[in-house]
Amino acid sequence: MVGCLCHDLDHRGTNNAFQAKSGSALAQLYGTSATLELHHFNHAVMILQSEGHNIFASLSSRVYSDIMQLLKQSILATDLTLYFERRMKFFELVNTGEYNWNVKDQREMLRSMLMTACDLGAVTKPWEISRQVAELVTSEFFEQGDRERSELKLTPSAIFDRNRKDELPRLQLEWIDGICMPLYEALVKVNPKLKPMLHGIKRNRCKWEEMHRKRQGSKDNVSCSISTQDIS
């Protein structure tokens, strides 16, 4: 819970790649791997060590050390680079039925996947909320792209390029299909009680598909209904 609350503390409005390319103070301090996540963790520790804020003060030194390690692992898990490194092994375990909660490494793997699922959770929320969050995040991406173009003299990738803002529906479909959907599908296999999240992302995908088709001038209809099989 603390990891979820603290995972984006003092966020700088840019991603790790920008920190590395710009040679920022954070990149020089933490290196170019999980730069921002390490900063978020250290910021959380700073708050916890402030007078009156250490909610773990009554724990033994051993348990406190374990909690800090768990907090660090949880926050670093929100780095999508680490997610991509770990997810295929997780998907393989789930799809073959070999995932075992009693194995420590597999529990840690699940915790990392759950942190990512929470971090990306806006894609599962009701459409109006999900769309608003997507637009806000895209606005932040565009600001980074503007800085890449003006400060670093680089051409930003599509998702950061303000000149391609009309491609948002297509980019959201790629985001959902490539990053989000496989994760929620795997998590539902681990715990079917997570199905509402999968239903939500499927509904929102249909909405983005409708918007994309309209912008492409397609007259084909897109069904946004969730099948009985999905609900069961």
Image (spheres, grey):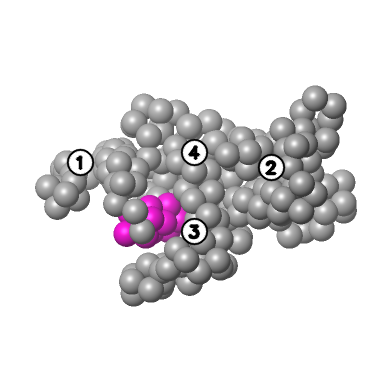
Q: CA distance from mark 4 to mark 3?
A: 35 Å
Q: CA distance from mark 4 to mark 2?
A: 18 Å
Q: Quadrant of residue 100?
A: bottom left
- Disc 1 marks which amino acid? Cys
Residue located at (22% from left, 45% from top): 218
Which sits earlier in the primary sequence, circle 4 or circle 2? 2
Q: Which residue is mark 4?
A: 165
- The numbered dot on residue 14 is 2
Specify start and end residues of the magenta stretch as a single range.
Answer: 177-189
Q: CA distance from mark 1 to mark 3?
A: 30 Å
- Disc 3 marks which amino acid? Leu
Question: Percent from the top left, x then y, of residue 192?
Answer: 29, 51
**Majority secondary structure of magenta residues:** helix
**Secondary element at tag 4:** helix
Judged by depth in the image, the label closer to the viewer, 4 or 3, is 3
Rate crowding at label 4 as few (under 14), some (14 to 19) or many (20 or more) other CA atoms within 10 Å.
Answer: some
Q: CA distance from mark 1 to mark 2?
A: 34 Å
Residue located at (77% from left, 36% from top): 57
- Disc 4 marks which amino acid? Lys
Farthest residue toward the left?
Answer: 228
- Disc 2 marks which amino acid? Thr
Left/right placement of residue 84 relative to residue 69 reads left
Residue located at (87% from left, 46% from top): 25
- The numbered dot on residue 110 is 3
**Secondary element at tag 2:** loop
**In the rendered structure, does residue 208 fall within the stretch colored magenta?**
no
